[in-house]
Image (tube, grey):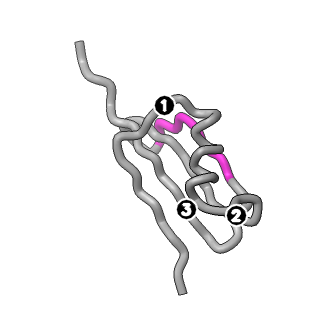
Amino acid sequence: MSAQPPILLAGDIGATKTVLALCQGAPDRLLSRKSFRNADYADFTTLLEDFFQENTSQPSAACLGVAGP
């Protein structure tokens, strides 16, 4: 029996919106993807909680791109 490929949380955190996705094993194996308007959230933790309310898969790693000056 082979082990399941790891699940990755990928994110693009910009000034006005954040896009989060869950991939399994490879970027083309998309499990879930959602875009959020940052102004609707007080902080990133609340945004993550919202994302994981709809997604029961738990990532073993994360890669986040964050906008900067």
* Neighbour tally class for label 2: few under 14, some 14-19, many 20 plus, Cα within 10 Å: some
| Residue 30 among those drawn in magenta | yes
**SS label for mark 1:** loop
Which dot marks residue 57? 1
**SS label for mark 2:** helix
| 38 sits to left or right of 27 | right
Q: Which residues are magenta?
A: 28-35
Q: CA distance from mark 1 to mark 3?
A: 19 Å
Q: CA distance from mark 1 to mark 2?
A: 23 Å
Q: Are marks 1 and 2 in contact (CB under 8 Å)?
A: no
Point 32% across, 25% down: residue: 4
Q: CA distance from mark 2 to mark 3?
A: 12 Å
Point 65% across, 47% down: residue: 34
Q: Nearer the viewer, mark 1 or mark 3?
A: 1
| Picture coordinates of residue 14, whole percent (x, y) | 61, 70
Which residue in the structure is indicated by mark 3? 12
Q: Are marks 1 and 3 in contact (CB under 8 Å)?
A: no
Which residue in the structure is indicated by mark 2? 38
